[in-house]
């Protein structure tokens, strides 16, 4: 079998990896092996951080709802408010509840005390 030289395909893959690492610093942006390792690490982190971001936003919404509830004496706790909403089959997600808490507190009072 004849020897194949990987000139163009190898250069193309390195150039592609190098363009991905354009914002990296030091050897992470200059050395091919280091660039590929950092690329793998960056892509793995971005995949995991998408789930982590969803968790963080949910925590933020719950904190905002809880603060609004306790400030306006709407309910004694966040868990009781959510339990009452489920009992009355008012299925409003936490993102919308947090926005209502910030923008229109009177509406939150009406939602929680409506029977």
Image (cartoon, helix red, strand yellow):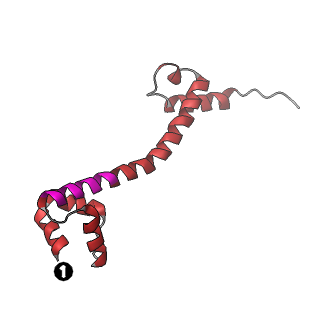
Visible residue check, residue 46: yes
**Secondary structure mostly taken by the magenta-highlighted segment of the chain:** helix
Foreground of the two, 32 or 70: 70
Residue 113: give x, y in percent of width and height: 16, 74
Residue lying at 66% horizontally and 29% vertically, measured from the top left = 10
Disc 1 crowd, CA 10 A, few/some/many (<14, 14-19, 20+): few
Q: Is residue 60 magenta?
A: yes
Looking at the image, residue 35 sits to the left or right of residue 80; the answer is right
Q: Position of residue 94 (x, y in %)?
A: 29, 62
Res 15 seen here: no
**Residue drawn 29% across the image and 64% down it:** 79
Could you tell me which quadrant the C terminus lies in? bottom left
Local secondary structure at mark 1: loop
| Left or right: where 50 falls relative to 83 | right
Rendering quarter of residue 98: bottom left
The percent position of residue 37, horizontal first and vertical second, equals 58, 30
User: Per the image, is 114 magenta?
Assistant: no
Q: Quadrant of the N terminus?
A: top right
| Residue for point 53% across, 41% down | 44
Front residue (pair 34, 9) = 34
| Number of callouts | 1
Instruction: Looking at the picture, tell me which residue is in the foreground, 54 or 3.
Output: 54
Q: Is residue 70 above or below residue 22?
A: below
Q: Which residue is mark 1?
A: 115
Quadrant in which residue 109 is drawn: bottom left
* Left or right: 55 in relation to 36: left
Residue 84 sits above or below residue 96 on the image: below
Q: Is residue 31 above or below residue 111?
A: above
Q: Which residues are magenta?
A: 59-71
Q: Residue furthest right?
A: 1
- In the rendered image, residue 99, in percent from the top left (x then y), is placed at 21, 59
């Amino acid at each position: 079998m004849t020897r194949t030289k990987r000139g163009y395909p190898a250069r193309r893959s390195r150039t592609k990896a190098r363009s991905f690492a354009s914002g990296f610093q030091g050897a992470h942006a200059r050395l091919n092996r280091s660039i590929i390792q950092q690329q793998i690490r960056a892509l793995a982190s971005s995949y995991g951080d998408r789930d982590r971001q969803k968790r963080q936003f949910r925590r933020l919404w719950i904190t905002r709802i809880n603060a609004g509830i306790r400030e306006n004496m709407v309910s004694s706790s966040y868990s009781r408010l959510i339990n009452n909403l489920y009992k009355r089959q008012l299925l409003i997600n936490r993102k919308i509840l947090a926005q209502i808490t910030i923008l229109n507190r009177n509406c939150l009072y009406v939602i929680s005390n409506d029977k």
